[in-house]
Image: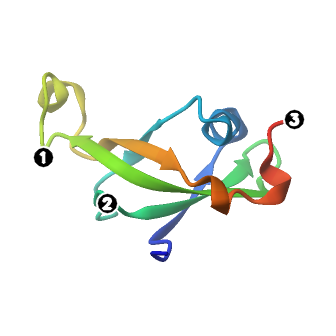
């Protein structure tokens, strides 16, 4: 298995639908990381109201990237140069046991 390339915060309202498979996209800063298709990201649930991690995490793999560098349709006009839209696939075998949706 490929190693995790980046560990990133994920707020609870976004983390839960990623774990359930309902959310397959992430908007992320693009100007401080070199995201590539195939990269594995460890998303760690972070509660901003408490300023702490919850201990839940999941590893996802990037399957597609839309940015102003590689435009499609309106992305050059719609996406700020600093951001990208990642299509992600949760790797179920990497779901932390405490991350199961309730």
Q: In this view, does 62 lie to the left or right of 71?
A: right
Q: Which of marks 2 and 3 is in front?
A: 3
Q: In this view, does 4 lie to the left or right of 52?
A: left
Q: Which of marks 1 and 2 is nearer the N terminus?
A: 2
Q: What percent of the width, then of the height, locates residue 38?
A: 34, 61
Q: What percent of the width, then of the height, locates residue 82?
A: 28, 47
Q: How many marks?
A: 3
Q: Distance between the residues labelled 1 and 2?
A: 12 Å
Q: Which of 27 and 87 is in front in this view?
A: 87
Write down the residue under mark 2.
35
What residue appears at the point 76 percent right and 60 percent down from the top-left corner? 96
Q: Which of marks 2 and 3 is nearer the N terminus?
A: 2
Q: Nearer the viewer, mark 1 or mark 3?
A: 3
What colouring method underlies this structural image? rainbow
Q: Earlier in the sequence, mark 1 or mark 3?
A: 1
**Up-down: is 16 above or below 89?**
above
Q: What percent of the width, then of the height, locates residue 92?
A: 63, 53
Write down the residue under mark 3.
102
What residue appears at the point 65 percent right and 62 percent down from the top-left corner? 94
**Up-down: is 3 above or below 49?**
below
Q: Nearer the viewer, residue 87 or 27?
A: 87
Q: In this view, does 66 lie to the left or right of 46?
A: left
The residue tagged with tag 1: helix, strand or loop?
A: loop
Tell me which corner region of the image, top left, top right, bottom left or bottom right, holds residue 27: top left
The residue tagged with tag 3: helix, strand or loop?
A: loop
Q: Distance between the residues labelled 2 and 3?
A: 31 Å
The residue tagged with tag 2: helix, strand or loop?
A: loop
Write down the residue under mark 1.
69
What residue appears at the point 48 percent right and 68 percent down from the top-left corner? 6
**Up-down: is 55 above or below 83?**
below
């Amino acid at each position: 298995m490929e190693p995790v390339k980046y560990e990133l915060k994920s707020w609870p309202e976004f983390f839960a639908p990623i774990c359930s498979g309902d959310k397959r996209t992430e908007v992320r800063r693009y100007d401080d990381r070199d995201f590539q298709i195939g990269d594995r990201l460890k998303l760690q649930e972070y509660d901003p109201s408490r300023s702490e991690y919850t201990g839940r995490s999941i590893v996802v793999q990037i399957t597609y990237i839309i940015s102003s560098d590689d435009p499609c349709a309106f992305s050059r006009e719609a996406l700020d140069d600093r951001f990208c839209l990642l299509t992600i696939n949760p790797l179920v075998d990497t779901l932390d046991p405490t991350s199961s949706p309730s």
